[in-house]
Amino acid sequence: MGNKGLDKAISGEYALGFEIDIETETVPPGLNESTIAFISKKKEEPSWMLDLRLKALKKWESMTEPHWAKLDYEPIDYQAISYYAAPKESLESLDEVDPKILEAYNKLGISLEEQKQLAGVKVAVDAVVDSVSVTTTYSEELKKHGVIFCSISEAIRDYPELIKKYMFSVVPMSDNYFAALNAAVFTDGTFVYIPKGVRCPMELSTYFRINAINTGQFERTLIVADEGSYVSYNEGCSAPTRDEHQLHAAVVELIILKDAEIKYSTIQNWFPGDENGKGGIYNFVTKRAICKGDNAKVSWTQVETGSAITWKYPSCILKGDNSVGEFYSVAVTTLAQQADTGTKMIHIGKNTSSTIISKGISAMKGQNTYRGLVKMNKSAVGARNYSECDSLLIGSQCGAHTFPYLESKDTKGQIEHEATTSKISDEQLFYLRQRGISEEDAVSMIVHGFCKEVFSKLPMEYAVEAKALLELTLEGSVG
Amino acid sequence: MSSIMKIENLQAKIGDKEILKGLNLELEPGKVHAIMGPNGAGKSTLSKAIVGHYDVDVTDGNIIYKNQIINDIAPEKRALEGIFLSFQHPVEIPGVNNAYFLRTALNAKRKHEGKEELDAAAFLRLMKEYLTLLDMKSDMISRSLNVGFSGGEKKRNEILQMMLLEPEVIILDEIDSGLDIDALRAVSEGINKMKDGKRSFLVITHYSRILDYIKPDYIHVLKEGKIIKTAGPELVAQLEEHGYDGIEEE
């Protein structure tokens, strides 16, 4: 976890800032026009946004919850959810935090100050003053390059033209049930715009943004990379965050214009529930990128270890000629977690190419499903795809499933698919132990070996976090 | 002469099958002991029992190492205390870099001995020396552990680990199987280099060929789960001529 100073600043400003006037207002559970109006008003939105939200609500009401995924969960009562939750109350000290979470923080090597802000404990004022300058430095640096990096609500108010042009252009509000729900009620999220020819001078992270640490229930993120620009964006973190919402339905839209590139990395470690599947977060995410211009490139890299239910298919629409889409994923399911994840690569432009590397790890009673689509339109002359889906099983109660879908419409496209399923064998473990390596270290060595291709795609600092997280997640799942 | 390892009346099963039926054996420090015997006599079971392999169920008797009964000691503990097995079929572990594995094993051992961990530079220097000695290509340590290694490369890599970890009891399970003459020579050279007058070797073999390269001090004949004869190296010639059938229990 980097930028400790910034992290402090984030929570600090939160604690000092606007919590006070919102705290008293809550919205009763249920979803209807007045809830939407309340949200829109809270966010001081222009009327066109409210109209869009109401339109989305209508769409959502006409749709039904999808159940094609290999996921098994209790029905969700959408009218029992509160769609505008007041910010979490700050805790007085770390003593009030679940000892299990503290243990995880310590194992991940998170400093006390960071622990406090992750857990939502009030942070001392001196820590804030200390780091405000850091925050200012980075925002000035970004401004100098013309990069816009702000919350989605600010963007709706300050950059209506960009929002009107790009929001819903990749994931339309009627795209799917959860996307429609998000469009109606989203309250958090990030907007990034990288101007023409600009290489964003730093890795952007949700950490940098005020309030982002407060994991939103219905986040909406929009990133636009204008012609010839580049940005690397990191979302989430390895530390388990305190969160009372069970349903999460986020939407991420990426727009990549000619010669531009977006690298989007995610580490997700939300509460997975217990070994019987009780509690835990339901994570229904729609993430999609469009390579609009020629030679555009997008890569999704994700490390998914949390949540009870994961429904997530970061996708790439390769419209521009020679555009490139990549998907690198490690999904871990242990305890009673279920993940149905994968990607869609839609080839439209000529000579487009895509790569899919998916690594699923299942332990204990975890169920891991890869679901991927590679579609080559008639126009995609010379398109290429390479897919590799590997599953690793630890123990005998878990499961791994692979559903690759291929659609090739009479192009001369080239599609290669490889899939393997392996088990951490007793022989492998024994071999390492005979060389004096402890059983736990032996397991993590084998697992890291399995995930290596994906971890190598993460920004360095993130890769270190991912490694530690994996170790922690699989602790005690063997033997 | 006091022994470094003593095996007393060892009885062991694999599954429901009794394999070792009251085996006695003493390893002397600094000596090379060869275990010879027909297929199915229990040679591999013996080596597995010594290192605590999960397949083997010790039902009676003791394995005593440095005056301590180790029957119930975890495999990694036995390894850290100096027992090393060169596997007959080293397992492949994809994605695990060989150098990373070697360094982890070495540092686990150093930590156990209260020594400082070896940094990457010092480790690589050490590697270079051993690779030359074993006539191994330098890219061998940057590949995934045993993945795609030829039979000879796998065995050389076992010996490399042995040299690195400097164990006190070294069990070589069919080290010569699948080796061509050059590999056999390189592997034997590595093993002979490890002789220091203190370390003991347990050479488990089906054929006498390896014993031309690693000179044994004792020959033990293992048959039907017991050591039935112990003699000097002159026994090899007799076994070659008459086979195991001619050997009677002493």
Image: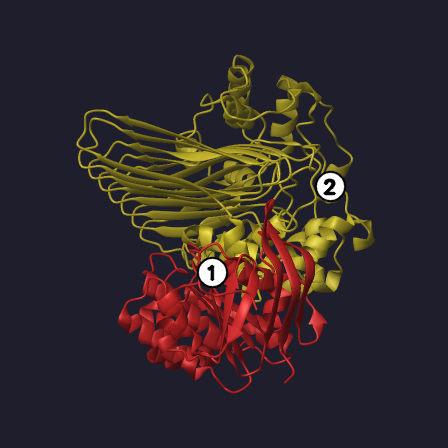
Q: Nearer the viewer, residue B198 or A59?
A: B198
Q: Which residue is mark 2?
A: A88
Instruction: List x then y, in percent, for residue A209.
Output: 57, 50
- Which residue corresponds to the image point at 47% horizontal and 24% vertical from the top-left? A173
Q: Residues within 10 Å of mark 2 (few under 14, many from 20)?
A: few
In the displayed image of the protein, which residue is found farthest to the top? A62
Above or below, A154 relative to A174: below
Q: Residues within 10 Å of mark 1 (few under 14, many from 20)?
A: few
Instruction: List x then y, in percent, for residue B242.
Output: 38, 66
Is residue A136 in view?
A: no
- The subunit carrying tag 1 is A
Instruction: List x then y, in percent, for residue A265.
Output: 47, 48
Q: Colour of chain B?
A: red
Which of the 4 quarters of the picture holds residue A254?
top left
Which label number is shown at residue A460? 1
Amino acid type at mark 1? Met
Position of B24 compared to A331: left or right?
Answer: right
Q: Nearer the viewer, residue A184 or A116?
A: A116
Amino acid type at mark 2? Lys
Does dot 1 land on a helix, a strand or a loop? helix
Q: Colour of chain A?
A: yellow
Mark 2–mark 1 distance (CA, rounded to whole Å): 32 Å
- The subunit carrying tag 2 is A
Tell me the mark number nearer the camera, choosing from 2 and 1: 1
Does dot 2 land on a helix, a strand or a loop? loop
Above or below, A173 relative to B192: above
Above or below, B127 relative to A179: below
- Which residue corresponds to the image point at 46% horizontal and 50% vertical from the top-left? A233
Above or below, A381 relative to B200: above
Query: Is the N terminus of chain A in the top left, top right, bottom left or bottom right quadrant?
Result: bottom right
